[in-house]
Amino acid sequence: MMEDEVSLDVINSLFHVYEIRKDGPTIRYYGEPQIEVQALYRALWDSFSEKGYHIELKREHGEYVLVAHRAVEEKERASINLALAVITALTVTVTGAVLFYGVNPFANPLQIYKGLPFAAAVMFVLGSHELAHYVVAKRRGMRASLPYFIPLPFISPVGTLGAMIRLKGAIPDRKSLFDVGIAGPLVGLAASVAVTIIGLTLPPISAGFQQEQTVALGVPLLFGLITQVVPATSSVMHPIAFAGWIGMLITSLNLLPVGQLDGGHIARALSGERTAYISAAIPLLLLATGTYYSLNGLNGGTLMFWGFFALLFAAGGHAQPINDVKRLDMKRLILGIIAFGLCVVCFTPLPLQA
């Protein structure tokens, strides 16, 4: 037995091994579980993880096989992430120039630069959110991709659908799931608050043709509280402040306790499998409320879009940590409750009204 391998005595206490086969970085242990399979998986995960292995338990030809794969860090193709970030920055810049300055990007392409401050603020908010997920995932020994920004010109009112990271491999325990889930919203919201305050203190800009139209923005409670402390310099919202407003809406959407959303990870870590009932109800509630608003002459389209969006994430189910038995400590329970409180104060049911 090599020093970088798990002691056979440790394995045999839980999984009686009668044959071992090695194939390069992979070790296959043939044997019989001595305890319930899921409990076996949880019990051996830490021992193998400390030695740099990921494990899976299989049934092959009527035999149990514990397969240990050497964890190899995949070389990330950062060029794709960088390209998407540049394209997204461009689409958000164009959107900002059109929305706030009335720039025609085809007739006056050299005027697109006016949207750069708006794009910088939006990218800062989105990037802060996703990098927080990335850093915490790495600290927890989880494999995660760099952030992928999602450009969406013309369709999205902001020029982007946001950003995301991809978790690869298993999630060790509820604590890791919770920490990764809550890191993004907390850091992203802090960035949104900072951007909002900066935007409110900046001098007004000359309104573009989009702002001259009568469009009322729904004001989240948190945004309204900030304006009470830091009064705006103009009745026309500055692009930087608008980026903070967007960040708060994104935070509230991400904190919905649904499937693979951040709020879904937090809720799953807090309450286990019972979260599935909440995850199924939230999209239906959003769809029903949006339909009600629309039937009564209000713009319920955004809520309905969120409902369909949440439905897709709910359909993906919740993340399943390896150790799903050990519960969270009191500090994380309180922080989880605070997180869902932030979801409420960042939410507005009618973001846009003509």
Image: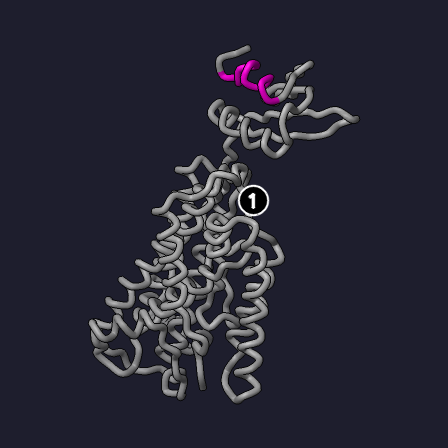
Of residue 105 and residue 220, the one placed in the foreground of this image is 220
Percent from the top left, x then y, of residue 62? 78, 26
Can you give x and y, in whole percent of width and height, for residue 330 in the image?
Answer: 36, 46
Q: Is residue 12 magenta?
A: yes
Under circle 1, the secondary element is: loop
Residue positioned 51% across, 47% down in the render? 166
What is the x, y in percent for residue 354? 45, 86
Res 121 → quadrant: bottom left
Colour treatment of the image: one colour
- Span of residues in magenta: 4-14
Q: Amino acid at mark 1?
A: Gln
Residue 81 is at least partly visible in this image: no
- Residue 259 position (above or below residue 327): below
| Left or right: 341 in relation to 10 | left
Disc 1: which residue: 320
- Is 54 on the left or on the right of 242, as rendered? right
